[in-house]
Image (spheres, rainbow, N blue to C red):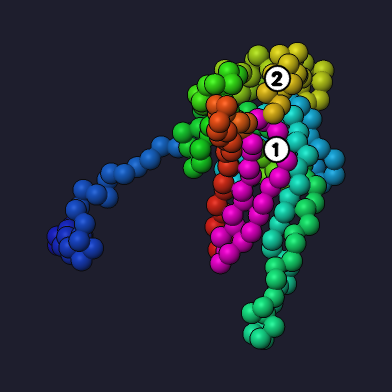
Amino acid sequence: MELTRNLVTCKLKCYLLKIPKKSCLHHVRHIRLAEVGKLETPKLQGKYETGQLILHRVFGYRGVILFPWVARIYDRDIPNKTEENTSDNFNSVEKEVIGRTHIFYQVLIDQRDCPHIRAQTEAVTFLGNQESSRSLYAIPGLDYVAHEDVLPYTTNEKMALQHELFDKFLMYKSDRDPCFVAQETLKAWQKKNHPWLELSDVHKETTENIRVTVIPFYMGCRGSQTTAVHWWRYCIRLENLG
């Protein structure tokens, strides 16, 4: 009698929930955790060195710092901004935004994490070397990361990152901190590609809890004797703060 009552109760619950009885036995996910390293305390002062392994605070991917850039941030968000419904505001002119210097980093992204990043990972595109060429080239797995978005970590793995340029740019040194140091290849690559890699200006503004960050890059000029076409690229980040 007790068994019959339990079966009736089970059928009634399945009917009320409008789900198949077998659904209780499926959709079991197996999650495996793997250690990648040990987190360090983020730096409040100073900058990170070349070879520092990082986690991106927003996108969560693993990466390594190649070199820093000093940029000027033009932030149009004013703390404790209040709107006054006065007639003077209708004719007011927006004040000029004064830029402040800030550190960004050129970062190499772990290719294992690229499929899980909700952003375009081909952050760097540039024109060909020929003046008449309009071909665009892309370097996959590069990003620009603000200092406050860096979560540093350490590891004992010699191949801590999977990227085709990782072992060409960096070399493992167990007695160094960070344990990856720049090779001459990285220094030559930075010098050669400096014009289209350089980050100089960053613009930020928040509207209705949506923060927009725009980074412009001048790529160069192409054209004939009569016309000139100037090329720019923009890195745009949308962040929901709500």
Q: Is residue 235 above or below residue 19?
A: above
Instruction: Give 97 or 228, whichever is nearer the viewer.
Output: 228
How far is the residue under mark 1 from the one under mark 2? 15 Å
Q: Which residues are magenta?
A: 196-218
**Is residue 54 left or right of 21 when viewed as pictured?**
right
Q: Position of residue 210 (x, y in %)?
A: 56, 60
Q: In the drawing, what numbered circle is on residue 192? A: 2
Residue bearing mark 1: 199
Q: In this rendering, does residue 74 appear at all?
A: yes
Q: Secondary structure at mark 1?
A: loop
Q: Amino acid at mark 1?
A: Leu
Q: Amino acid at mark 2?
A: Lys
Residue at 59% x, 21% y is 131
State the image quarter where residue 14 is shown.
bottom left
**Is residue 90 left or right of 103 when viewed as pictured?**
left
Instruction: Give 117 or 188, whichever is nearer the viewer.
Output: 188
Q: Is residue 14 above or below residue 197?
A: below
Closer to the chain start, of discs 1 and 2, is: 2
Name the image quarter holding the N terminus.
bottom left
Q: In the drawing, what numbered circle is on residue 71? A: none
State the image quarter where residue 123 is shown.
top right
Q: Magenta span: helix, strand or loop, mainly?
A: strand
Q: Position of residue 126 (x, y in %)?
A: 58, 28
State the image quarter where residue 70 is shown.
top right
